[in-house]
Amino acid sequence: MPIGRKVWAIAEGYIPGSSHGPEPALTSHEAACLLNAGDRDAHIEIMLYFSDRDPVGPYRVVVPARRTYHLRFNDLQEPESVPRDTPYSSVITSDEPIVVQHTRLDSRQAENALLSTIAYSEA
């Protein structure tokens, strides 16, 4: 039986505009950890939603079968870079069941903050 779902949402997104500490390890970032435990590659699309402008996307990534991929939203460039210091939400869709976990590293000061939570999955 496959593990995961095909539609996920991360309602809380924000990439701080500054960082404290060596890059890239301590660069402030948002990430989605994508687990594809299935036997087929997962083709994934990500849409970003904002409070004051139209959505952006889709951003596309592939997670090979039986692999995990740690996707930093900071690294997304096409169709455009994800803005810093701007709240956003994301919807992640996949053609294969996957599991999504959301993580943020906020290193704007020396006392770093890290949060992680499972994303919301549509049954």
Image: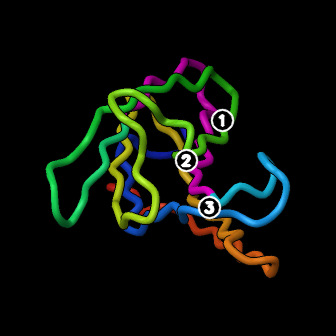
Can residue 1 be seen in the rendering of this structure? no
Image-quadrant location for residue 17 = bottom right
Provide the secondary structure element on which disc 3 rests.
Answer: strand
Disc 1, disc 2: CB below 8 Å?
no
Q: Position of residue 47 (x, y in %)?
A: 30, 43
Please tell me how crowded label 3 is: few (under 14), some (14-19), or many (20+) other residues with Cα within 10 Å: many
Task: Characterize the magenta stretch by its predominant secondary structure.
Answer: strand
Q: Position of residue 67 (x, y in %)?
A: 70, 29
Please tell me how crowded label 1 is: few (under 14), some (14-19), or many (20+) other residues with Cα within 10 Å: some
- Which residues fall within the magenta stretch? 29-45
State the quadrant of the C terminus. Answer: bottom left
Can residue 14 be seen in the rendering of this structure? yes
Q: Amino acid at mark 1?
A: Tyr
Give the residue at x 30% y 32%.
Answer: 58
Name the residue beneath numbered marker 2: 99
Query: Is 28 left or right of 92, judged from the image as shown?
Result: right
Q: Amino acid at mark 2?
A: Val
Give the residue at x 37% y 64%.
Answer: 86
Q: CA distance from mark 1 to mark 3?
A: 13 Å
Residue 31 in magenta stretch: yes
Give the residue at x 25% y 41%.
Answer: 56
Give the residue at x 58% y 68%.
Answer: 117
* Label drawn at residue 94: none
In the rendered view, tell whether residue 66 sits above or below residue 105: above
Query: Is 112 left or right of 70, judged from the image as shown?
Result: right
Closest to the camera, between mark 1 and mark 2, is: 1
Depth order, front residue of 40/58: 58
* Label drawn at residue 103: 3
Name the residue beneath numbered marker 1: 69
Residue 58 in magenta stretch: no
Please tell me how crowded label 2 is: few (under 14), some (14-19), or many (20+) other residues with Cα within 10 Å: many
